[in-house]
């Protein structure tokens, strides 16, 4: 399974200060400290660039940018620089669906089969009963990785949503939480079907345009047309590098939006205003508040024992400071984002950055809230959150994942004649792939566009390849099973086998 795809990291951890009333004076006093910390973070090279927006009691009190849009280039980040939001697209999308519920187009409990009779989950009963609420709260039973891996192969949104039925369930329907990009996408797309309009157009009509979010879009092409946009960065030899681009149109509601801090601050005003913006109602409160109601248990903090919940597009947590709504986002290709709100205090912060992995957004937000409540941070939150991300996604984690292939066997067994492996293989989920030989080297072509990867022999019928563009040194296994006729009867691609769908049977010869 691909370790790093459109994340979702849960904003966990308790804060050092006891709950107390927030005031304008306390917020104002914390802002210069946040500004200086953001400057230091960029100066230390912890991210190339970032942008921050803060709203307090329906007023945008802070919106600034720091660093550069792309390393090696002169253009700086401002409050108007557009970033890819990754999974912060989810709470934004929940707002769009809430607008449809507000208009009476659907309800949160409308069954998907009544909107899209062709959609199916792996099991029959959830397929018949699953609702918009189930899919947007990640309690449909769909496996977390379902669809993620074949999105990388270039399949369309429609084709991916068709193929998730062939995956294995990731949990019990309405009893298990499994964070699913394409489950969320399926629910949001289904909600639009009665309108006859596309997701991207409805997001503009219902939320972006009414809030004046002129630089916000749910289309990758719109992001690429922005003159003031940020590149994605990953670490290569210890340096932040703009290595690849990321088109997330297939999962647009779950991870494909782009925006800037100035626009996102207007959305925070709508959320903290419970559907009202600039004094006028945009979305009915009854529809919007459902997105922030605890719907499924998300996690239990091993240190504090506190239970975290998920609503629809929102993490919902109950802490000393009261209820908190949050969501994080990440692309392994190089994005980190965060939104965090304290609704009782009408205080919200959004942080957009252009690098992965990094815990800078969580660290900045936690430090700011400590400053507001206690006048000083209770710990070095930047170091704390960087440590969490490094442990889970950094070079060490990648090295551990590659450990089985770090060194070839001392005396590797030779492969079969390469023609034994060539041919076509298929399953319902991955589709058709082809293994070919040229000049004594095997390669495999995957997906609708036939993306080609070289196979490097490791031992007997085990080969390696590098499927992750953002991590070109990350090798995963490709194993052939030899049949009684001396030819491979099946192939298993390790990175596509997280839910058991990476094994494909031979369909014909070369």
Image: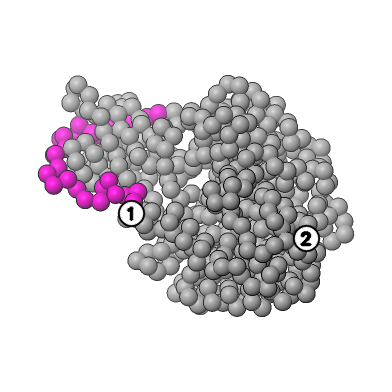
Q: Could you tell me how far apart the alpha carbons at marks 1 and 2 are, in whole angstroms?
A: 43 Å
Q: Residue at x 62, y 53 (%)?
A: 327
Looking at the image, which is closer to me, 17 or 510?
17
Is any atom of residue 355 visible in this view?
no
Quarter that holds the C terminus: top left
Residue found 65% across the figure and 34% down from its top = 134
| Mark 1 vs 2, N-terminal side | 2
Q: Is residue 280 left or right of residue 255?
A: right
Instruction: Provide residue 160's location: percent of width, then percent of height.
Output: 52, 36
Q: Which residue corresponds to mark 2?
A: 346
Which range of residues does the magenta coloring cover?
399-427
Q: Residue at x 70, y 67 (%)?
A: 373
Residue beneath disc 1? 399
Q: Is 485 drawn above or below residue 179 in the view shown?
A: above
Is 346 rendered above or below residue 97?
Answer: below
The quadrant in which residue 26 appears is bottom right
Q: Secondary structure at mark 1?
A: helix
Judge by depth and name the residue closer to the eye, 269 or 37.
37
Percent coordinates x, y for residue 116 in the rendering: 65, 29
Horizontally, is 470 left or right of 265 in the view? left
SS class of the residue under badge 2?
loop
Report if residue 422 lies within the magenta region: yes
Residue 478 shown in magenta: no
């Amino acid at each position: 399974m691909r370790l790093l795809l459109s994340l979702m990291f849960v904003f966990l951890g308790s804060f050092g200060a006891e709950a107390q009333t927030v005031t304008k004076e306390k917020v104002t006093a914390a802002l210069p400290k946040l500004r200086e910390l953001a400057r230091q973070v960029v100066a230390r090279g912890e991210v190339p660039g970032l942008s921050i927006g803060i709203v307090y009691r329906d007023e945008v009190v802070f919106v600034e940018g720091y660093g550069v849009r792309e390393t090696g280039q002169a253009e700086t980040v401002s409050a108007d620089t557009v970033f890819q939001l990754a999974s912060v697209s989810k709470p934004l999308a929940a707002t769009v669906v809430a607008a449809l519920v507000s208009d009476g187009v659907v309800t949160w409990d409308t069954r998907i089969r009544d909107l899209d009779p062709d959609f199916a989950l792996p099991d029959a009963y959830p397929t018949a009963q699953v609702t918009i609420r189930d899919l947007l709260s990640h309690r449909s039973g769909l496996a977390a990785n379902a669809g993620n891996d074949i999105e990388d192969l270039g399949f369309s949104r429609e084709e991916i949503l068709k193929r998730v039925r062939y995956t294995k369930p990731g949990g019990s329907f309405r009893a298990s939480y499994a964070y699913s990009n394409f489950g969320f996408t399926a629910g949001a797309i289904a909600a639009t079907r009665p309108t006859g309009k596309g997701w991207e157009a409805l997001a503009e009509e219902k939320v972006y345009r009414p809030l004046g979010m002129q630089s916000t879009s749910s289309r990758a092409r719109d992001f690429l047309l922005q003159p003031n946009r940020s590149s994605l960065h990953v670490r290569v030899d210890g340096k932040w590098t703009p290595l690849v681009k990321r088109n997330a149109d297939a999962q647009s509601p779950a991870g494909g939006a782009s925006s800037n801090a100035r626009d996102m601050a207007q959305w925070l005003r709508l959320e903290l205003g419970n559907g009202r913006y600039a004094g006028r109602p945009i979305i009915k409160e009854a529809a919007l508040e459902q997105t922030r109601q605890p719907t499924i248990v998300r996690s239990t903090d091993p240190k504090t024992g506190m239970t975290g919940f998920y609503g629809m597009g929102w993490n919902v947590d109950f802490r000393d400071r009261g209820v908190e709504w949050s969501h994080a986002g990440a692309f392994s290709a190089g994005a980190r984002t965060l939104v965090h709100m304290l609704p009782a205090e009408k205080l919200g912060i959004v942080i957009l950055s252009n690098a992965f992995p990094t815990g800078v957004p969580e660290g900045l937000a936690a430090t700011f809230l400590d400053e507001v409540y206690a006048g000083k941070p209770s710990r070095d939150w930047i170091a704390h959150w960087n440590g969490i991300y490094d442990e889970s996604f950094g070079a060490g984690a990648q090295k551990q994942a590659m450990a089985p292939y770090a060194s070839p066997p001392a005396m590797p067994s030779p492969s079969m004649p390469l023609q034994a492996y060539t041919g076509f293989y298929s399953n319902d989920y991955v589709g058709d792939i082809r293994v070919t030989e040229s000049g004594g080297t095997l390669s495999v072509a995957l997906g609708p566009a036939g993306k080609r990867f070289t196979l490097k022999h490791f031992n007997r019928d085990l080969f390696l390849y590098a499927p992750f563009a953002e991590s070109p040194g990350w090798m995963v296994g490709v194993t052939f099973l030899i049949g009684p006729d001396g030819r491979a009867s099946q192939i298993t691609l390790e990175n596509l086998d997280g839910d058991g769908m990476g094994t494909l049977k031979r369909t014909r010869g070369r």
